[in-house]
Image (cartoon, rainbow, N blue to C red):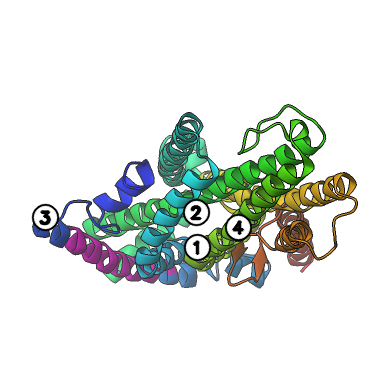
Amino acid sequence: MNSVFPGKMLTAFGFLPFSTKNPTLRFLGRFVCAFYMMGGAAGFVVLSTIAVFSMLNTATARQGNSFLLLLTWTPTFGIYIRAFIIMIMFLAKRKALYFLCDETLRMTNRLIPHCGDLQTHQVRWQRMANLLGIATVLGHIVWYLTDYIGLVLPSSSVDNNKHAETHVNETTQQLLVPLKVIWAASSFYVSLFCLSQQVIVMNVVFAAILRSLIRKHNAVLMAILDGLKGGHQETDKKVDEFRVPDATVRLILIEQLATARYNQTELSKFSAQINSVFHNIVFCAHVLDQMCLMGFVAAVIVTGPSVNLANWIHNSVSIVFFVYYSTLLLLPLARVFDEAESTHLKAYQLAVGIRRHFSSEPIDSQIHEHLQDILGASEQNNIVLHGGGGLITFTRSWFAGVMTFGLSFGVLAYEITQRSNSSNSSS
């Protein structure tokens, strides 16, 4: 875990312990973690206070629907709250995470027994963790810098932004907040969100590992079926069943089905372990990202480019980033469901093939007992990644519904704004 970028970054900031047993380094890690959590809480109070006073100062100056105007402030609080809550929940689940890592190692060695194949998968997972971890950090820094895009806009565009910036400057002066304090609070604001993204990346990587293991399990089921059909694919026993008596084939098949049943059960447990560590974390991230996304959509519609070009560009870029955070980044969780759904079909095909080959086999035999267990363990929603204890089931249909809801909300917000502007102009 500490060999990939997310683990290294979380270790550097004290949210994961150093692998060494040196007590000084371990104390230093705990100190840095405590410092960051307290600094993050203080930074949230500073930035929230400034935001609340700015919201009150601009409330009379801005026109439009009150609900949409209030919603535009959601990202200001939601992004910080998201990062802070995720890191608190991650600290609470740190021991469970190490147990999950041990289980991952055991499961990968069991379902991918060939050393070369296992190394190939490990390199792929490590590359995925490193790329996503670095991309989320760099992407969030770029997103944060777009908030200062007004500094590079032409002077004619900057003039349109002075009215909104004046309120912020007046608020800062009224509260007597030093600039260094604001920059320190902003650094916690950015770094905590980047750290929370590393936790989400770890969940995504564990989902990718689970999907690969389910795919390997499905391949074993198909290999057993191909052996019965006279195929040339290898099975665990590497035996050509059709050159040995049926009694021997039956014994080999019983052993293969028993192994497949055990693997199916272990995959269900592994899925449950991933959910136990991450279900509240990913639920919080997904819901708050959606709330922030709605806030940015409302801000783009309420504050057009003619009113404040810099803010409009920043909010438009924010929509792209938070659509990615709340949907595309989490798609590997939905792919687990897709792969697990195919297991039941493959198990059913295997059952049909076995019944054809062993047509006289008693219904209460070991073969049919194992088949029924595999079919039962591979039923719908048996292996699926949840959020919030089952409030959200991460499937492609869920993400499609989220995108549809976002588009519908954008259209509704636009219609409300148009009617509000029409009524204001007529009056």
Q: Counting residues from the N terminus, which is met first, the one under dot 2 or under dot 1? A: 2
**Which residue is tagged 1?**
278
* Amino acid tagged 3: Asn
Which of 8/102 is in front? 102
| Nearer mark to the viewer, of 4 and 3 | 4
Q: Position of residue 220 (x, y in %)?
A: 66, 41
- Label 4: state its secondary structure: helix
**Which residue is tagged 2?**
203
* Amino acid tagged 1: Phe
Residue located at (47% from left, 60% from top): 79
* Amino acid tagged 4: Tyr
Residue located at (26% from left, 65% from top): 39
**Which residue is tagged 3?**
22
| Nearer mark to the viewer, of 4 and 2 | 4
Which of 153/21 is in front? 21
- Asked if one can make out residue 74 in the rendered structure from this viewpoint, the answer is no
Q: Give yes or no for contact between labels 2 and 1 (Cβ–Cβ under 8 Å).
A: yes
Q: Categorize mark 4 by other alpha carbons within 10 Å: few (<14), some (14-19), many (20+).
A: some
**Which residue is tagged 4?**
262
Q: Counting residues from the N terminus, which is met first, the one under dot 2 or under dot 3? A: 3
| Nearer mark to the viewer, of 2 and 3 | 3
- Label 3: state its secondary structure: loop
Q: Position of residue 15 (x, y in %)?
A: 29, 59
* Amino acid tagged 2: Asn
Q: Which residues are magenta?
A: 29-51
Gap in angstroms between the C-alphas marked 3 and 1: 29 Å
